[in-house]
Image (cartoon, helix red, strand yellow):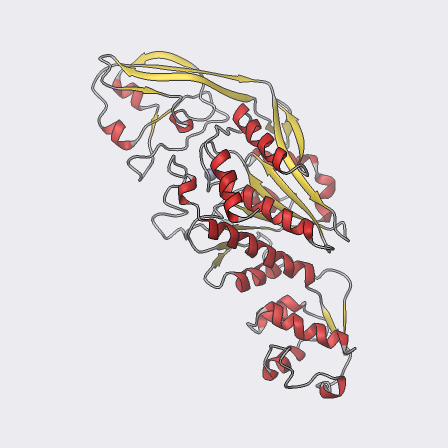
Amino acid sequence: MTGSEQLHVLAEIGPLRRDLVSAGYDQAMSLLVQRFPSLEIGLWPSGTSAWGWPIPDAWTFRAGSVRSESGRFEIDLAEHPLRVGSYSVPVDTTLSRDEFLQHVRTHPHLPDALPFAFHYYADRWTVGLSSHERDTLPDERFHVVIRSERSSSNLSIAEWHLAGDSEVEFVLSTHLCHAGQVSDGLSGVVTGLAVMERLAELPRRRLSYRLLIGPETIGAIAWLSRNEHRFDSVAGGLFLEMTGLDQPAALQHAFASDTWMNRALSAGFESAEPGGWQAPHRQIVGNDERQFNAPGVRIPMLSLSRALPRSDPHAPFEAYHSSEDTVRLVSEERLEQSVETVLTMLSVIESDYTPVGHFKGEPFLSGAGIDNDDPALRLPHRQRLMVLDYLDGALPVSEIAQKLNLPFDLVLLFVDRLVEAGLVTRKTELPE
Ligand SMILES: [Zn+2]
């Protein structure tokens, strides 16, 4: 998918009412499956348990309205998915202004936006208003009608599995819920699909890859609870969202940061996104990677987004959890750049290895046919000598590159050349 095709998918699916288990979510899923037939859908029946979490019923919003006694204030709750809190219980009641205000949700800083409110596991109803609407409500009684229902159905998760040479697997995690919103959730789905398309084109892959598309939190828990037998073979993962915003890229590390997976993906990120920033687990944005990193699972999953640091008053982005999180904030170039960044990060775990030198002292490079002035070896001579210091089988190429603050691809090019010259061999097992 080119950037403009990605934008097209965002524009088509963005406005849908994609509550956790809902007709709008299923509609989004079938649009994706039509476009990407490699996606396979798994179903989790409502009411069954996933590690103690109940799989929710489907929620259907049929109609609703709020009208003040005089008719001075009147809204149709069907006009935007965020007019009603997700999973609101049905209601038909008349309330005083103060009583009604207890059910009103507004966005904390965008005066014209509707907020994203949800109460998946509570018997509650809420109405989304702009701050301006709330502040100008007449002092009258309000008749509120919400026609909604919860019914038994299935939570659905799409998977795209690409087999590689090894059964060792890497998971790309994304979420499709968040009704009417684009950057939060849906943009990561589109980036994940574009990455899988490109991975599928590779003549061979060292690792196997699995893209997951589900509802946030409960989807990750549902998938993990059914796939415990896979935990040992999943080497790591990456959660994706907010990938099309015109903001610097942000890489949140795994809970287990002192791992090859974390360091290798971080090295790839550094070379792909020189203007990007990184922070530890739970220090940027919290999504499905929380479940993968948690006790009992402990799969090192990092998170790539274009979220602003928490010190920024607009973090993670100004329109977060609001009706203004639309395709208008998404840049085609940033979408394309995010796909390239993920592919660069994955190319490190595809090509990294631990080099073992078979020489004592500094090797006689000219004698092995490696010319000091060879322009194909883009690493300067002095830095090549620094790389040689680390070739005792202790560190993978990615870590040597990070220790020396050198680009991974240039260090790899040099070490590969030493392998061809017979001065170094590759350890066959993946680094740890
Ligand atoms: Zn969210």
Q: Which residue is pictured at 62% across the width and 33% down the height? A: 34
Say left or right for 407 vs 317: right
For the C terminus, the quadrant is bottom right
Q: Which residue is pictured at 77% across the width and 52% down the height? A: 166
Observer-nearest of 20 and 341:
341
Q: Which residue is pictured at 55% across the width and 26% down the height? A: 21
Q: In which image quadrant can residue 118 be found?
A: top left
Q: In which image quadrant can residue 155 be found?
A: top right
Up-down relation of residue 405 to residue 370 (above or below): above
Question: Residue 90: horizontal and vertical position, in percent?
Answer: 44, 15
Q: Is residue 432 visible?
A: no
Question: Residue 201: horizontal and vertical position, in percent?
Answer: 68, 51
Up-down relation of residue 113 to residue 272 (above or below): above
Question: Residue 361: horizontal and vertical position, in percent?
Answer: 72, 86
Question: Residue 409: horizontal and vertical position, in percent?
Answer: 62, 68
Q: Is residue 79 visible?
A: yes
- Total tally of numbered discs in the picture: 0
Up-down relation of residue 57 to residue 275 (above or below): above
Say left or right for 328 vs 213: left
Q: Which residue is pictured at 57% across the width and 74% down the height? A: 404
